[in-house]
Image (cartoon, helix red, strand yellow):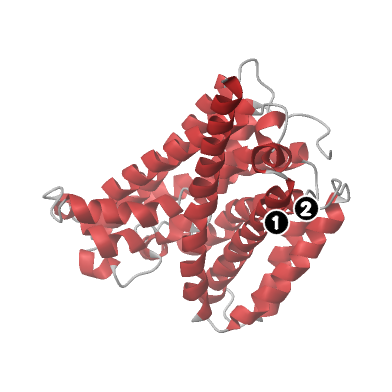
Amino acid sequence: MIQLKKISINQLICLVILNQVGVSVLSIPYKMSQISGYDSWMSLIIGGVIAQIGILVVYQLGKNNPNQPIQQYIVSIIGKPLGLIINLLFAAYCAESCLMLIVSYSDVINRWLLFETPWFVLIGLLVIVTGYIASSSLRSISTITQSITLMFLVCFGIIFISSFGKGGDIRHFLPIGTHGITPILKGAVPAFWAFAGYELLLYVFPFVKCKKKKEIFVAMSIANGITTLFYVFIAFIVTYNFSEKQLTLIPEPMIFILRKYRWPVVQSFDILFIAIWLSVTLVTAYIYLFLSARYLAFIGRKENRNHSLLVWLIAIVCFVAGLFFTQRQLIPRFSDYHNITTPIFIMGVPTILLLISFVKEKVASK
């Protein structure tokens, strides 16, 4: 195994939080507002609750197999042939998630900052940085992520400073629940997509240093709770600043808010934020690239121990695939496809595996 040391509970929390936030912060609550309007913040809370249920499922799977990552114990649950297929599908999903992050943020940088920079340069630079970090050990990645948490806090400070400026209206929040419970529940579906990332526990569970396994669940819950509060905070800011009609037309409302804010010390908050938030987005990208390589390592007869080679092979595939997105209209289509696969792999597959494991234990005990 490439894990030389275990990671701490604090590192796990940092991994989960930064793996969840990604690019979603820029677009929240754009997609939810198209369904639930000003009540999108309630959709986000429900999405966080659903994610917490998913965390419980993943935790129970890990608790039942505390000394192995999912790539190994999945074989004992559903058999070797099907287990290898699931590992391959998880590897493809993680690679797709990495590509989605890189393409999405490259598009943001291209539209807001580097207008004339060739697309292949943006994709290439992000892939190189992502691949370099992902080729490290889990402990090294956790340490880097823990350091980048400081950048996350700086971005939070920027958002907080610029959040409640002129032009907002507190009446946007009233009356609460205008659209009814059905749109709020429907809006929770795209809200749940924003919480993807907690499924990394499927792999890291046996590598977390703790006295009791319950500490892992508590840490995951804390991380998911912080992400939920952060998302709701963003939703409140955006709702305060824009009307419902405006929200349906602005894909990245947070950047618009930062752009209109003026502060004597910093000329353009939006440029500063996008530049710093790049480091946070790369966390999600390199974690998924790392996980993709680890799943791919277990699809043969024996574990492939050349982790760096697998990482760079997947990185090259992501780079080549990313070149096709010079046509910007393909990105929303790719995003829609990604949003279909996300609940399948972060909620559907773990739930099915847990049920099969539960049934096998019941049968064996008789």
- Name the residue that disc number 2 marks: 299
Crowding near the residue tagged with mark 2, few <14, some 14–19, many ≥20 C-alpha atoms within 10 Å: many
Please tell me which residue lies in front, 156 or 304.
304
What SS does tag 2 mark?
loop
Measured from the top left, where is residue 224 in percent x and y?
Answer: 47, 37
- The answer to whether residue 98 is left or right of residue 356 is right
Do the residues bearing badges 2 and 1 touch, measured as CB atoms within 8 Å?
A: yes
Q: Is residue 142 visible?
A: yes
Name the residue rendered at 74%, 69% in the picture. 317
Split into 4 quadrants, where in the image is the C terminus? top right
| Residue type highlighted by circle 2 | Ile
Q: Which mark is residue 331?
A: none
Q: Is residue 7 visible?
A: no
Measured from the top left, where is residue 233 in percent x and y?
Answer: 35, 45
Residue found farthest to the front: 366
- Name the residue that disc number 1 marks: 88
Crowding near the residue tagged with mark 1, few <14, some 14–19, many ≥20 C-alpha atoms within 10 Å: many
Name the residue rendered at 54%, 48% in the picture. 349
Name the residue rendered at 62%, 33% in the picture. 12
- The answer to whether residue 241 is left or right of residue 59 is left
* Mark nearer the N terminus (2 vs 1): 1
- Where on the picture, by quarter, is residue 110? bottom right
Measured from the top left, where is residue 280 in percent x and y?
Answer: 59, 51
| Residue type highlighted by circle 1 | Leu
Q: CA distance from mark 2 to mark 1?
A: 6 Å
Please tell me which residue lies in front, 157 or 215.
215
- The answer to whether residue 129 is left or right of residue 61 is right
